[in-house]
Image: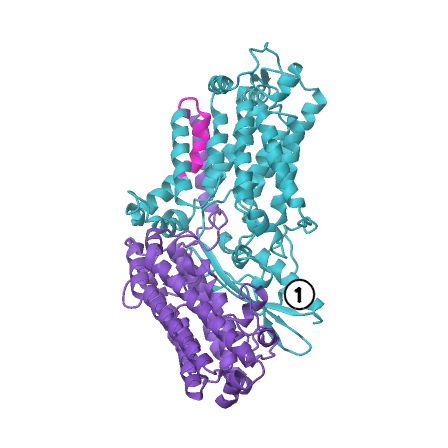
């Protein structure tokens, strides 16, 4: 058994496979990133999310990341557009994908208000794409330098993407295995009726049993779809499910580009024959596409291969550990959100909150309520109201602001109420705690009030 | 393949056990039997029976106000001043039922800020009077226009109407002041008419057909504006003048209608108007919507909690008297007590109501959290 397993893994890593799936992935990823970036720019979000608010919620350890001055951010988004095009057509591929990865991740790190699992997913995909020769086939680079062309590549260059996708789906499925999702059908019981205006099916969406069907189907889909896509026998049907699942979630929920990204990248699971067919179809659209190229294998020096192996092993270890880090924290995960991000937890909660900050001058004893809209946009304020690390960060910012205004060691307290999956709002943060003196860290935040089903 | 699926199943089952299985409140007592709420019927009721009547009355009031200004400017007498003041008060009262609908046609003309930005910038008003010119488009004139500017021009803090009249008759800038007055009431009338015409025309259909729950749907607009306008009430009409945001330093002059001294009356009307929108008057409203969604709060129904808090907040406000500015100076604690009750309603409306209905409050994409 161990021998066959080792052999099997060895095959998955080293056995030569056709490069076509990787070229298709490059084109699919590049083009959807182009659309996604243009959409972000056209919606005016660069200004609304990054330039307008004077304060940003940086990630712990990335406080040095600041929104660049002037038009730099527009230039950066311009770079994203250009590199997305370059990735799609395979022009100066490595430089393009590295630039794309760096710029995209940089923007994501500027403010966790905009954190979405799908942005994290894009960063992860772009990161993985740095290490593979996706430009060595059907690309401008090959047209420029025919020497670069290869037809076969080692299996790992494709299988890492399959592994990543299986992990994403599987962890998303695991996170749905809880009381709220399966037994209470929350939050779909709230979200689906909100779509009751939809033609034809609108009426159905208000039915409770429909919320249960969606919840259970969603959980089962996420848990197994990755494995079904791996199987030659079920792949076609699995992909039909992928289409149904993502298109319907795209229709019901405001989740932006995510469904389309997943629909395109899951193409990687298909056989090389299918991908060659896709490439041949694309060639028909291009008058000057290169004719058949001789068979040639991709070759990488041993030390480079081992370096890449090292990086990938580290990457997947992190991927496996991250979703479980919540186990180290006490309390209800959805309530505290400690260890919540970077774990493929999507669509799990309907959470809303209102928070009032009070700043007190210890010398005079006078107190003031803060107008949050002075420093934050609505998006930031709403996200902050339900996430303790953001609350703390903002409290520290307020302490500094009032220090500047001449108040020595201002005391920052909150009055905050949060509702989770229809629980009704209840006190969220201990309102007696001076957040100005609380430190951020990976430890449990003791000043989050425990979630209890009875207390107000 | 089967092996991998089995492995996945085992892992999944074992993880159910590890994962916190604690439920979030609504779970067990939620014998929800389907919240098939008809949003279009609610929108129909609210637009037909509340919004359009509100704009109709407000536009009529603004037309009368403008006519009263014309009469007064032609014949500036004490009697005509009193008539004008009454027309002003009637308009300001009617505005309280109108301010919450700042979307669609109202948003197109920035109705809320153009009509009711206060405290007024007295220096700017006096400068406009001195210069004899007034450009309504200037941002600096936002606090020198609309109802608050009329409030300043038409009322004397000591209640001495003869002194007010003198400013429009014997004062060296009397003519300029009259021109300014006429420009202000004309702008109010024009804006009110534009918005009413839009609602009477095609906008009502647009409104009725946007039956979704996203941020640009009609329900989304109503909820967001209800919450926003309620915040305006709580902060600008009560909190800020009472010193809630200024280290306890009170600013009695920052109340709404400081010069005509009808602040509390207006606030009570405003609260009633927001409550009326919530209730959908006697028809389908957010109360019915929350009941249909079986929204819970603290073991009871969220709708009951919201209605009770509307009552409590109104009762606390009723312990105060006009002029509110004097109350703030003499008894800030009582004003802050009312503010605290208003604040509790903010949480119920902004967090509980919005979340129970799954209404989008921002335009960005989400992950569902």
Give the answer, above or below, for where A290 lies relative to A129.
above
Quadrant of res B229 = bottom left
- What's the coloring here? by chain
Instruction: Report x, y in % for residue B349.
Output: 42, 64
Q: Which residue is mark 1?
A: A399
Give the answer, above or below, for where A28 lies relative to B176.
above
Chain B representation colour: purple
Q: Residues within 10 Å of mark 1 (few under 14, many from 20)?
A: many
Describe the element under mark 1 as helix, strand or loop.
helix
Give the answer, above or below, for where A264 lies relative to B364.
above
Identify the image quadrant of the C terminus of chain A. Answer: bottom left
Q: How many marks?
A: 1
Quadrant of res B98 = bottom left
Using the image as rendered, state which of residue A51 and residue B206 is in the foreground: B206
Instruction: Report x, y in % for residue B256.
Output: 49, 76
Instruction: Report x, y in % for residue A196.
Output: 32, 49
Q: Is residue B238 magenta?
A: no
Q: Which residues are magenta?
A: A220-235
Point 55% across, 72% down: residue: B144
Q: Is residue A225 magenta?
A: yes
């Amino acid at each position: 058994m161990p021998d066959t397993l080792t052999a099997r893994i060895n095959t998955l890593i080293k056995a030569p496979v056709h490069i076509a799936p990787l070229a298709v992935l490059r084109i699919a990823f590049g083009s959807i990133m182009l659309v996604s970036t243009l959409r972000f720019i056209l919606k005016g979000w660069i200004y609304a999310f990054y330039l307008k608010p004077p304060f940003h919620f940086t990630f712990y350890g990335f406080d040095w990341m600041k929104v660049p001055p002037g038009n730099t951010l527009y230039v950066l988004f311009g770079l994203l557009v250009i590199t997305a095009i370059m990735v799609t057509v395979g022009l100066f591929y490595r430089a393009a994908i590295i630039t794309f990865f760096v710029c995209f991740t940089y923007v994501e790190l500027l403010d966790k208000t905009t954190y979405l699992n799908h942005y994290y997913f894009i960063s992860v995909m772009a990161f993985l794409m740095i290490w593979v020769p996706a430009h060595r086939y059907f690309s401008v680079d090959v047209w420029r330098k025919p020497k670069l062309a290869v037809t076969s590549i080692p299996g790992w260059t494709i299988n890492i993407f399959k592994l990543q996708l299986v992990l994403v789906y599987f962890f998303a499925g695991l996170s749905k295995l809880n009381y709220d999702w399966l037994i209470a059908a929350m939050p779909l019981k709230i979200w689906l009726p909100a779509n009751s205006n939809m033609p034809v099916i609108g009426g159905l969406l208000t039915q409770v049993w429909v919320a249960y069907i969606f919840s259970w189907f969603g959980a089962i889909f996420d848990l197994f779809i990755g494995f079904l896509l791996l199987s030659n026998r079920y792949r076609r049907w699995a992909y039909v499910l992928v289409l149904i699942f993502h298109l319907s979630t795209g229709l019901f929920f405001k989740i932006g580009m995510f469904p389309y990204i997943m629909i395109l990248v899951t193409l990687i699971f298909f056989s090389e024959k299918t991908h060659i067919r896709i490439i041949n179809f694309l060639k028909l659209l291009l008058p000057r596409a290169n004719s058949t190229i001789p068979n040639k294998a991709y070759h990488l020096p041993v030390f480079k291969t081992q370096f890449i192996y090292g990086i990938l092993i580290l990457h997947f270890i992190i991927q496996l550990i991250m979703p479980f880090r919540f186990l180290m924290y006490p309390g209800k995960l959805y309530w505290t959100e400690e260890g919540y991000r970077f774990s493929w937890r999507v669509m799990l909660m309907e959470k809303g909150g209102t928070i009032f900050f009070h700043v007190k001058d210890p010398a005079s004893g006078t107190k003031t309520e803060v107008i949050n809209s002075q420093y934050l946009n609505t998006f930031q304020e709403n996200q902050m109201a339900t996430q303790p690390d953001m609350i703390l960060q903002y409290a520290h910012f307020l302490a500094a602001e009032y220090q500047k205004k001449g108040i020595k060691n201002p005391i920052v307290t909150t009055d905050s109420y949060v509702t989770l999956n229809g629980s009704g709002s209840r006190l969220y943060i201990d309102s007696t705690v001076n957040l100005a003196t609380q430190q951020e860290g990976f430890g449990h935040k003791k000043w989050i009030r425990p979630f209890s089903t009875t207390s107000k | 393949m089967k092996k991998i699926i089995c492995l996945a199943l085992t892992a999944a089952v074992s993880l159910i056990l590890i994962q916190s299985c604690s439920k979030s409140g609504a779970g067990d007592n939620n014998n929800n039997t389907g919240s098939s709420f008809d949003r279009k019927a609610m929108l129909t009721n609210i637009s037909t029976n509340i919004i359009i009547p509100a704009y109709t009355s407000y536009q009529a009031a603004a037309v009368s106000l403008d006519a009263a200004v014309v009469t007064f400017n032609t014949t500036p007498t004490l009697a005509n001043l009193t008539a004008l003041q009454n027309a002003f008060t009637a308009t300001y009262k009617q505005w309280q039922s109108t301010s919450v609908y700042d979307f669609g046609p109202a948003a197109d003309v920035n109705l809320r800020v153009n009509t009711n930005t206060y405290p007024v910038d007295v220096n700017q008003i006096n400068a406009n009077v001195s210069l004899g010119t007034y450009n309504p488009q200037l941002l600096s004139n936002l606090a020198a226009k609309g109802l608050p500017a009329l409030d300043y021009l038409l009322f004397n803090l000591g209640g001495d109407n003869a002194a007010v009249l003198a400013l429009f008759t014997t004062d060296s800038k009397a003519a300029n002041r009259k021109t300014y007055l006429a420009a202000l009431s004309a702008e109010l009338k024009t804006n009110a008419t534009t918005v009413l015409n839009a609602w009477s025309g095609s906008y009502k259909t647009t409104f009725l057909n946007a039956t979704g729950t996203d941020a640009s749907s009609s329900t989304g607009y109503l909820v967001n504006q209800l919450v926003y306008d309620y915040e305006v009430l709580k902060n600008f009409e009560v909190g800020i003048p009472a010193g809630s945001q200024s280290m306890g330093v009170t600013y009695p002059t920052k109340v709404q209608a400081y010069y005509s001294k009808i602040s509390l009356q207006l606030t009570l009307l405003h609260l009633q108007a927001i409550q009326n929108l919530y209730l959908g008057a006697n028809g389908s409203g957010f109360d019915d919507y929350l009941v249909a969604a079986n929204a819970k709060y603290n073991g009871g129904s969220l709708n009951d909690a919201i209605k009770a808090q509307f009552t409590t907040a109104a009762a606390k406000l009723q312990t105060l008297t006009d002029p509110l500015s004097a109350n703030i100076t003499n008894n800030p604690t009582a004003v802050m007590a009312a503010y605290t009750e208003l604040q509790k309603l903010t949480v119920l409306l902004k967090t509980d109501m919005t979340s129970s209905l799954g209404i989008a409050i921002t335009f960005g994409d989400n992950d569902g959290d």
